[in-house]
Image: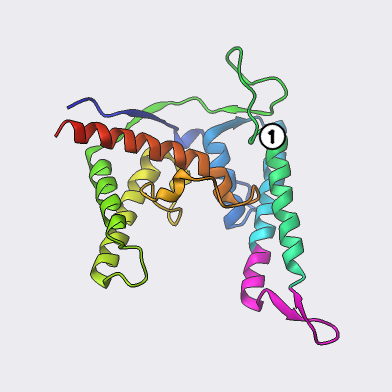
Amino acid sequence: MPKAPVIAAFSAKAIPEPPEELAEAGRHLWRTVMHRYVIEDAHAEVLKLACLSADSAASMRRQIKAEGETVTGSTGQPAAHPLIAAEGAAQKRVAQFLTRLGLFDEPKRSKAGRPPGQLIMPRPPVRDGEITDEIMVLFDHNIELLKQGADKADAPSALHDELHDVEYRLGVLMRKTFGEHWAFGCGSPADPALDDECPYGPGYQMAVDWPHKQRDRQQLLAALAARRRQR
């Protein structure tokens, strides 16, 4: 059997902790970006501003969800919740700050180091992680369950529970091996939706994670194809 592909992982000790004033959404964005890039202290404030904006957007989304997207206007007419526009503005600020860091448009390098005009550079790998047999077995099983319609609303409860168990176990291993973009609740690498463009706008955390998830899925698919050829 061919040697399992090797991927780069990063040391948790090298990742700066998020500022105390950040809430859940901001802390997740901070850890996701810091996990992948080296950002000097002088420029970390830009990332912090992006994270604070992510917290604002998340807070407004919770309020909109609780109150409904439609409210009663001053004359009794239905109107869009006023926080919808403010949420969109906060998401736009997230994208602007991350773009300012150079996160969405990384120039090509002619030599090692930070590209000209960028405030960040990819964090160098400090250890190797393997795509283990356990990951491949769960990934293969996850694909088969989706083919059987285990994610559909009318799927038998036993099949749905099996899918949930497999995706949870796979998610734990993906997060440990590939990184924080596979944090719990962030989908499965077996999901064929990852073969398409990201359906989320640039202000959403999923838009930051999407290309990394796509890369990991393609690596797993290639490894799975190699395993099946050996059978």
Residue farthest right in this picture: 75
Q: In this view, does 218 lie to the left or right of 101?
A: left
Which one is in front, 130 or 41?
Answer: 130
Residue that sits furthest to the bottom in the current view: 76
- Please tell me which residue is depicted at 27% across the width and 57% down the height of the picture: 145
Magenta stretch: give its range. 59-80
- Secondary structure found at label 1: helix
Rendered residue at 20%/36% (across/down): 228
Q: Mark 1 points at which residue?
A: 101
> Callout 1 environment at 10 Å: few (<14), some (14 to 19), or many (20+)?
many
**Quadrant of the rendered structure where residue 80 is?**
bottom right
- Is residue 96 part of the magenta span, yes or no? no
The image shows residue 171 at horizontal and vertical percentages of: 36, 50
For badge 1, the amino acid type reads: Leu
Quadrant containing the N terminus is top left
Q: Give the residue displayed 44% in from the left and 57% down from the top.
A: 185
Q: How is the image coloured?
A: rainbow
Above or below residue 59? Residue 221 is above
Q: Residue at horizontal 73%, vertical 24%?
A: 117
